[in-house]
Amino acid sequence: CKLATSRNLSPSLSNRSSPLSVNHANQNRYCDSQADPFANGADIQISNLDYRMSRKELQQILHDIFSRHGKVKNVELSPHTDYQLKATVQMGNLQEAISAVNNLHRYKVGTKRVQVSLATGGSNKSLALLSSETMSILQDAPACCLPLFKFTEIYEKRFGHKLTVSNLYKLTDTVTIRDQPNGRMVCLLPSSQARQSPLSSAQSHDGSSANCSPVIFEELEYHEPVCKQHCSDNDFSENEFDPDSYKIQYVILSLKTFAPQVHSLLHTHEGTVPLLSFPDCYAAEFTVLKMVEEGEGGVPLEHLIICVPGVNIVTAQNGIKVVKWVHNKPPLPNTDPWLLRCKSPVRNPQLIQFSREVIDLLKNQPHCIMSHHKFIPNYHHHFGKQCRVSDYGYSKLMELLEAVPHVLQILGLGTKRLLTLTHRAQVKRFTQDILKLLKSQASKQVFINEFGQAYHWCFSKDWNVTDYGVCELTDLLSEIPDTTICIAQENDDTVISIPKRKRIPEEIARTKQFAKEVVDLMRHQPHFRMPFNKFIPTYHHHFGRQCKLTYYGFNKLLELFECIPEVLQVLECGEEKILVLTETEQINALTAQLIKLVRSQKDSCMMLSDFLPEYNKTFGYTLRLQDYDVNTVAELMQKLCHIAKTLNTPLGKQLQLINKKPFRTLTAQLMVLLMSLDGIPFLTFDNLKNQFDSFYGYALVPSEYGFMSLAELLKNLPYLVEVFSTDAGEESVKLTNVYQFAKNVRSLLHTYHYQQIFLSEFPATYHKYTGEVLQPKLYGYASVEDLLVAISQVVWIKGHGQKRIIVLKNSMKVWNSSSSSPACGVEDCEQVLEDPKRPITLAVEKSERLEECDSETKEETSSSS
């Protein structure tokens, strides 16, 4: 066989259809009378007919109303034996049928509104369409035959819907399916080969013939193996070239510099450069490529070429790899680089899972590179299962690997080919890794000079940029969108950080409420955990509404979860993410389950040995003791000593609940205590316990109220107190802003004899007493009245109109100092009179007016009665 010596002499396109004409023909294949399933008319089905009308009258009315929208060929009514009266109207063509359906659905005929729908065709029409589609594929195949798996793949990719193989056996006049040693073959019958394919006579979009279509080298049978102009080996012979002799070359180049040079090479070489002579062509126009050995900080040249946006490497049918533009022309200057990458063509769920496994396997290989001979044993060793090529519909491993080009790149030629991840997969992987690294930093940022150290601390391995397929870190950072990370200059160094969006107070408040909803939802899940991808549908089902991320100020669900680390943590199990409650919340959830379980037993107690079986019976799953770092139920109960106790009985150990003190009483006690402390902005936990002991005469024991610790107890009072850590690392507590205001109101009302004041005069009096202008919006309320209602445990409002009065509640009237026990009201009033802050004159005047108001109210009441 004599090889062609020039590109023009290659058997390129003289006997092949244009890809453009093929696409155009696919769009117009329904217009062919031989293939159109609606060529003889389109059927419309009508139901919900008025059975009170006569059949003749119904038939005439249907004919008349459908005739307004086109030619009616026939009107048929269902036989009398049918349970429901229906009709079928045959229109002249599909367009008229669609128009009739759109206009006559729910049209009133007699006393009922009819249901009108298009009959999408019987089996004969479906088979006619399938026959046409099958012919269009097989007539372009070698010998008009294809393996069944390959035919199925091409069919579903071209026509966009699933192929039912059993229907192929019904096309007895079109195809035959033969059993071969390597699988089944779909072959076009000779009688069908003689027919003209709908694709063969089609024209391209611009009206040109197939011979004038642009060159697409994926479709060519031949391409020159080397560049005749720049190849250094003048004696190169394609017949003598051994693909196994090709050695993969490693280079160290910045992608920022290399990318424009590759595009310049393609311009000067008419859009194509053979890979074998790429180094020679590059050296002729720029400089000699500096090659390095594998493992010396370089990346494969073939991989680096594909990293260039808009450039691809394809294999001609003579086995030669060619560097070319993705769309056979230079990309536009402002084109998004991601649009020029290889997108996922995979729709098969099995291949989607396989592509994920390929990424997981290769990222654990040195520099993400592996010989294709080692794929099967490495796959078996990594996943603990065999990789069966036939499970994915292929007969050869290389065909399976070529089916996932969006994640896998095959380097080299012959039997020494290597496997690596594509640049798109590497950038996606690096984006996930750098976000994980940044989130592990306290400041959510890292300097370039400290990147290697931070990477080692986060992933427990040394940083090597070649593991991600490029030679410089900046090449990777430039591929990540600005919405994902921020890159800025700071003190002669570059800092990488996570973009921060300032959330409004409403979004922060909603996030706190969302945290409570998450706890409620997770408590209904087995072991208080669920898969990450199940959260959205489970949330919707549980609460009856959608989880809208923008409602909380986020764009990603994972970011929302990371904002509530005190209740939820996200665990990574391979490629899968698992949501699980924090240890504290798990204990709280288990506590609630324990209370429910024990209270459901007779006499509210149960034997300790019956706990696990009863738990399984009540909640539907087995309690895993290892989740709580214990080995026995007795050890678990020691962790729950604040809620349950075990007693020794003649029958064995018995489990009982502890009688808790009322939490509401403790809340009022803490409120009075913290409001009675003057000049002390906050208390440490130890000081709070000491103050409580001296104030009330007994110790504050959290377990008596059903809590494991004081911190957990105080966190259940978020409206009253705020828990925080001081600079010294001590846990402390202080009143919230609203109850700081309540403390001031209580102090103000204590300066009055009756501990009450007119609502209309309260803002001015508050300003005189505290020196602060009262602004309810600073506390999150629209008006003074709303703010006072929010502290209903301290004050209440009585009366109507202008005579409304703010009254201090009885539980707040006793003035307690931090150094003495509660005293009687008379002594407290005397102490209040000596308070230098008290406006005495104002207090006397207001007291007299309030007495007058009370007397007027009593007179009105007596007269009305």
Image: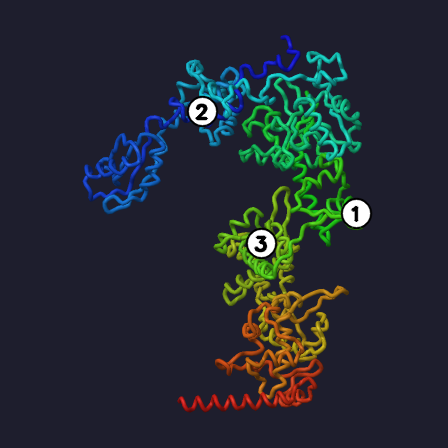
Q: Position of residue 12 (x, y in %)?
A: 59, 16
Q: CA distance from mark 1 to mark 2?
A: 61 Å
Q: CA distance from mark 3 to mark 2?
A: 52 Å
Badge 1 element: strand
Q: Residues within 10 Å of mark 2 (few under 14, many from 20)?
A: some
Q: Are marks 3 and 1 in contact (CB under 8 Å)?
A: no
Q: Nearer the viewer, mark 3 or mark 2?
A: 2
> Eyeballing the image, is 283 above or below 845?
above
* Screen quadrant of the C terminus: bottom left
> Eyeballing the image, is 555 above or below 266?
below
The residue carrying mark 1 is 493
Sooner in the amino-acid sequence: mark 3 or mark 2: 2
**Corner quadrant of residue 128:** top left
Q: Residue at x 70, y 72 (%)?
A: 682
The residue carrying mark 3 is 528
Badge 2 element: helix
Q: Amino acid at mark 3?
A: Phe
Badge 3 element: helix
Q: Nearer the viewer, mark 3 or mark 1?
A: 1
Front residue (pair 286, 421): 286
Q: Position of residue 67 (x, y in %)?
A: 27, 35
The residue carrying mark 2 is 133
Q: Amino acid at mark 2?
A: Glu
Q: Nearer the viewer, mark 1 or mark 2?
A: 1
**Corner quadrant of residue 478:** top right
Q: Residue at x 20, y 38 (%)?
A: 55
Q: Amino acid at mark 1?
A: Asp
For residue 526, side relative to residue 448 (left or right): left
Q: Answer yes or no: is residue 148 visible.
A: no
Sooner in the amino-acid sequence: mark 3 or mark 1: 1
